[in-house]
Amino acid sequence: MSESAEQGLVELVSHGDVQEIALNNPAVHNAIDPQMYEALDAAFTTAQADPEVNAIVLSGRGKSFCSGFDLKQSSDLAKQPVFDQYQLLAQQRATLLKVWDSPKPVVAAVQGHCLGAGFHLMNHVDIVVASENAKFGEPEARYSLLPQPFSVWLVGARKAKELLLLGDTIDAAEAHRIGLVNRVVPEQDLRDTAFAVARRVALMPPELMGMTKRMVNATLDAQGFRTMHEWAWDQFLITKLMTTELKEKFLSIGAKDGMREAYTWMRKRFS
């Protein structure tokens, strides 16, 4: 039996001892903005505090898991005072670490686009089930923004450099091959498979699951994960503030012909 609690941009649905947290703005392919980060933070706080919840499924409503950060909002936020931007990024980083540090294992069900900020969010969960139509990538470099380094720990430095420097999108089969996702299934089986995995985890002793996650995360922290997590977000702010020839061209097209034309120009440039 499922019980749903609407949270606006994020929806909580109880499935017994498994809590679903769903990004809920399908009209824009669940593009993340500060309001969605706040709702996501509140949802994880609720799920982690519920003694009846032993595992969490993170999903996205509609055609995509998450298409990335809302670039219109990003452009607007860039006009705010620098320290305000810094504080906002710190809050968003804390939300992602709340997912990472969750004592209750998190399984992501990923379909459609999983790009940029959505890709970063996915990289903070424990197990990823992807549909065959899922697309993954970190296109930040194409917009003169610093990509995040999480994939270094997931796929190794050489493959991570390829993803970060080229900004290419890869399909689910390739994501599975290089270790970004655990399982790839037909789209119609995505939810059932993700919940089956979460229910298996939920059968385990919750105390042991929390300790096991802490052990793995501490191992990655010893390799610099948390230090680089903080450093990269600070560097990201620098790239938001700096100008490049590519960024200026993109913004000038957007100002003259609209952002749709700017995105079309960018896609053609790198096609």
Image: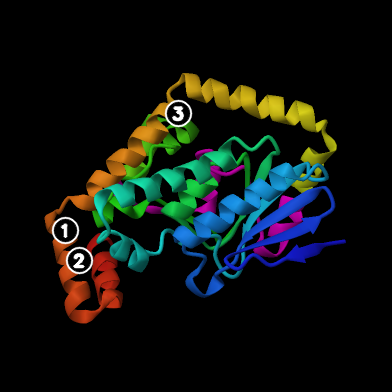
Q: Residues within 10 Å of mark 3 (few under 14, many from 20)?
A: some
Q: Is residue 263 left or right of residue 12?
A: left
Q: Can you identify the residue that label 2 sits on? A: 250
Q: CA distance from mark 2 to mark 3?
A: 33 Å
Query: Label 1, on which residue?
Result: 246
What x and y, as percent, mark residue 163?
Answer: 37, 44
Q: Residue at x 31, y 39 (%)?
A: 234
The label on residue 228 is none
As displayed, is residue 98 above or below residue 212?
below
**Residue 201 appears anywhere in the view:** yes
Q: How many marks on residues? A: 3
Q: Amino acid at mark 2?
A: Phe
Mark 2 or 3, nearer chain start: 3
- Label 2's element? helix
Q: Which residue carries the number 3 mark?
A: 225
Q: Earlier in the sequence, mark 1 or mark 3?
A: 3
Q: Is residue 168 magenta?
A: yes
Residue 57 part of the magenta-drawn span? no
The answer to whether residue 95 is left or right of residue 116 is: right
Element carrying mark 1:
helix
Residue extent of the magenta highlight: 166-195
Pointers 2 and 1 in contact (C-beta within 8 Å): yes
